[in-house]
Amino acid sequence: MTEQTAGAYAKVNGLEMYYELHGDPQAPPLVLIHGGVLTIDLSFAALLPALAERHRVIAVELQGHGHTADTDRPITLPDLASDVVALLDELGVEQADFFGFSLGGLTALQIGVAHPERVGRLVLASTQYHQDGYYDEVRTPDWSSPRLPNEADFAQMTAAYARTAPVPEHFQDFLAKVSAAAQAPLAWTADDLTALAAPTLLVIGDQDFVRIEHAAEMLRLIPRARLAVLPDTTHMSLMTKADQLLPMVGDFLWG
């Protein structure tokens, strides 16, 4: 039996949070958390069908993203993590695996640190634990850098927001709000990573936002971690590399 919704909403923490269910409702749950200014589709379209063959996939759209309307609340990682955990409570899911990309990876890491009992395995794609984990041209944006989103990437984000957002004309305000959240200090310490209980797969591109040295430091700190670096891969292209991602993610989740 397969389960698929065109989309549903749950009332959590003052949000009308959008989510989708895919796959067998009796299969192990896997939560997908998209990147900043992205949607379920923009982050996971290339991966979701294969993941749903082995999981009950719960794909979420965070505060202000996609179909989930924004509120007056600032966007913070503790709140985003709390929203996802509250959604799992609504769905009766006590524990799940998590696959987060970029802002979604930060949210998944926050869940792993603050709610370890809710996490089976963690896949953290393009995720740092300290802001100095980003390259300088990302922290202080140099838009000539190939590491950063290009015009086509921004056009895709803008079109997705116009297509899905409850208030499409708020895109620039939303973009500024997400940018502020992305640049905010991260509260984690090395001790938080050494205490991380969940087996963790770290994935970055060799031309990603995240420095390879920083990802290697995370590999050293997290007790049960693996690290994959995809060649010729930027931040925005990482999640499109299904032919490379699916075998390693599948081996990690199912092996």
Image (spheres, rainbow, N blue to C red):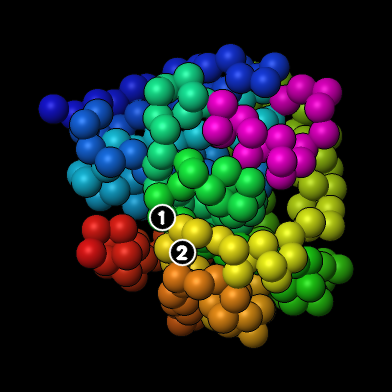
Magenta highlight on residue 239 = no
Report if residue 84 lies within the magenta region. yes
- Give the residue at the far left of this rendering: 1
Q: Are marks 1 and 2 in contact (CB under 8 Å)?
A: yes
Question: x%, y% of residue 235?
Answer: 58, 66
Give amino acid for label 1: Arg
Residue 230 x/y as whole percent: 45, 77
Q: Secondary structure at mark 2?
A: strand
Question: Disc 2 residue type?
Answer: Thr
Q: Is residue 174 above or below residue 126?
A: above
Q: Residue drawn 64% across and 84% down?
A: 213
Q: Residue furthest bottom?
A: 213
In-image side of 132 versus 31 (left or right)? right
The residue labelled by disc 1 is 121
Report the span colored magenta: 70-86
Mark 2 is surrounded, within 10 Å at the Cα level, by few (under 14), some (14 to 19) or many (20 or more) other residues, namely many
Q: Which residue position holds label 2?
A: 200
Quadrant (top left, top right, bottom left, bottom right) of the C terminus: bottom left
Q: Is residue 144 visible in the rendered structure shown here?
A: no
Q: Is residue 95 visible?
A: yes
Report how far apart the C-alphas of labels 1 and 2 lie in the structure. Answer: 6 Å
